[in-house]
Amino acid sequence: MVGRFPKIRWAQTTNVGYVPNSNMPNTFMAVAIDLPDFKSPTGAIHPRYKQDIAARLVLGARNLVYSDSEVVFQGPFPTGYSINPQRQTMLITFNNDKSSLQVNHKNGFEICCASSATACKNQSSWAIVDIVQYQQSTVEIDTLDCYLQHIVGVRYLWRNSPCALKQCALYDSDTQLPVPPFKKIFGPSEESVI
């Protein structure tokens, strides 16, 4: 179920997907999307164990507060999208091709198939798609569901509780930090076809 939590998570980053960003330059947070506790008496988004969350927050503090730029405190974030209509796939590049991704499974992605970006507000415009191939810092997702329409958007982990404990699809292979949920809606000039 999509629910309201993906929109809340997105809004917490001022609709950018990560912090710090230009709207929130002195802010850091820990991504905990992969740490649900489905048996917690206060709900899955409030796990009873806090060690993993605390360890991730410490990384942010070391980097941003104590200026230790060697400390990585965020999982990889997408920096490039290119559509290959012949293969009917989309290639997503993370951290300007400088990440080392760990791919646990092929789930978690959705694409918006429509004639305009406004249609992406409708949940029925989104199709669940799989990772079909990956390399060190890229994943290639299937876009066959958009065969007769345009690919207007892509999103990752856009569900209330999209994965079980430490079982999301994408992590940084060195730090084991998860790729955070993200959403990208393409404008007419942004479509990148290879």
Image: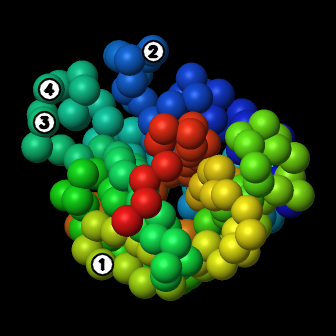
Residue 186 in picture, x, y percent from top left? 57, 43
Sequence order check: which comes first, mark 4 or mark 1? 4
Sequence order check: which comes first, mark 1 or mark 3? 3
Mark pair 4, 3: CA separation: 6 Å
Camera-nearest residue between 149 and 164: 149
Q: Tag 4: Cα neighbours inside 10 Å, few (<14), some, or many (≥20)?
A: few
Q: Tag 2: Cα neighbours inside 10 Å, few (<14), some, or many (≥20)?
A: few
Q: Which residue is mark 2?
A: 23
Residue 192 in picture, x, y percent from top left? 43, 53
**Residue at (55% x, 77% y) in the render:** 88
Secondary structure state at the residue bearing disc 1: loop
Q: Which residue is mark 1?
A: 135
Mark pair 2, 3: CA separation: 21 Å
- The answer to whether residue 90 is visible is yes
Q: Amino acid at mark 1?
A: Gln
* Quadrant of residue 4 within the rendered picture: top right
- The answer to whether residue 36 is visible is no
